[in-house]
Structure formats: C-alpha cells, structure tokens
Amino acid sequence: MKLSQEHIRELVRASKNHSCEPASCCVQLVAIAELPSRFGEFQVCGFVSPCDGKDHTAIIKGNILDKESVVMRLHSECLTGDIMGSKRCDCRDQLLESLKYIEAEGQGILLYLRQEGRGIGLSEKIRAYAIQDLGVDTVDANLILGFQPDERDYGVAAHILRTLRVRSIRLLTNNPEKIEQLTKHGVNVVERLPLIIEPTEHNRAYLETKTEKSGHLLGDLAEIRDVAKIQSFTKREKNAK
C-alpha cells in the first residue's frame, strides 16, 4: 500500500507549518508524486533545504509512516556514475541494487542527497579526478585540494526521515560513518545491510582506498551487520589514527 492523497496532504501541510531549532538543518517537503520505474512502482518526494540551498529527494516504496525497521539507502548524488555510468566508482551499481532491494522488500526509502563528490561539488570532484589520474588516491586528492576526505553531513537526511515519520531504519551501506552520523542526529539505525559490488579493473584501487583509509566495510568485514559492533569498530579505528 502506498501513501494516499490524504497522507500526502497531511505530510506537506505539517512540513510547511513546522519550525526548527536554529541549529537544525531544516528541510521542507513540497510535493509527493507517482514514480513508475523499470524497478517497480515508487513515489518521489521533493524537499528543499534552506541550510544548503539544494533540492533533495526521497524515493519511497509503500506506506512508511510510523514504521519500524524500514529499509533505507542513503545515496549521495554522483553525476559521473549515476548518469554517465562511470567505471571509476561503484555509485551507479549501488543505486540500482538499492532500488531492486527496496522493490523486493515491498517497502523502503532511497534518500538521494545533492552531495556530489562526497560534498565538494561536481567541478571540484573533476579536479580531484584529474589529480587521481596522476597516481594519487581519492582521499589524498581531496586533501590536496584543501578538503576533508568526506565533507558530507547527514543532518538533512535525519530531518527527511523525521518528516516522513520513520521510526527506525535498516541501512543499506558499507560506510560506518553514515551510521555514526545518523545516530548522532537522532535516527534509530537498528541494522546495517551490506551492499557489496564486485570490483572491476577500473574501481578496484578506489574501493581498496575506501576500505583502508575511510573505514568502509568491504572484504572480510562486509558481513558485520550489528550496529553496536560497527560503531565500536569505527571508534577504535579513529583512535588508532
């Protein structure tokens, strides 16, 4: 069962009339529409965020209002991968596999956030690519440009989940940082669902760097699902550095 027109009107009205604390990263739900796709029947939610000046979307399957343990993928925009099919990353494969997973589950959310290049923007990501072409890895390329390895913040994602009245999630991710940040922002992450994509000759070094320098749970660590264990592992890794 999908969100009804009554549900949609209620959510849009509540979002329009709500107020946030000054320190919060606020978003406003502007509309929800039908989204038939090659993966199944979804609904798409449009959000605007004054805190970053960007539009974000939530692709939802079923009625997720007030539900527990909702499958969710938190996906950051990647024009080169998602749209152009770049082989330098695994973003497009993760996006498509997530939609397939949610469709098979019969209920879930894919949050598509406008955070190109791990938050540095498209042009800067292309500059980082040019540096990587000289033999530098993805983390060090960001550092050379004066950025953190990952500039993303997931306050917007947490606010979107509150707007959609989702009580707890099972997160499709290999990135412990997403679990840590969402938890910090008040999201109840009850389980991690691994999302492993087979490496290719083009992205193998990129994925190895994400494992070795960014703490992504690939390879032997891929099947760790317990959120408390992941958070403990992440803290140990950070303290070791």
Image (cartoon, rainbow, N blue to C red):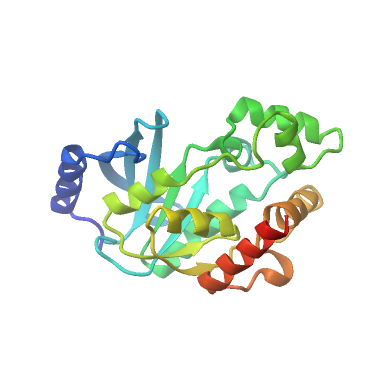
The location of residue 186, given as percent across then percent down, is 37, 57
The location of residue 107, given as percent across then percent down, is 36, 64
The location of residue 150, given as percent across then percent down, is 61, 42
The image shows a total of numbered marks equal to: 0
Residue beneath the point at 79% across and 42% down: 137
Residue beneath the point at 20% across and 48% down: 11
Residue closer to the observer: 30 or 27: 27
43 displayed left or right of 79: left
Residue beneath the point at 29% across and 61% down: 64
Q: Residue furthest right?
A: 135
The location of residue 229, given as percent across then percent down, is 57, 73
181 displayed left or right of 117: left
Residue closer to the observer: 133 or 213: 213
Figure quadrant of the C terminus:
bottom right
Q: Can you say whether 42 is above or below 69 in the image?
A: above
In which quadrant of the rendered view does residue 119 lie? Answer: top right
Q: Can you say whether 136 is above or below 164 in the image?
A: above
Residue closer to the observer: 22 or 4: 22
Q: Is residue 46 visible?
A: yes
Q: Is residue 39 visible?
A: no
Figure quadrant of the N terminus:
bottom left
Q: Can you say whether 32 is above or below 42 in the image?
A: above
Residue beneath the point at 76% across and 51% down: 209
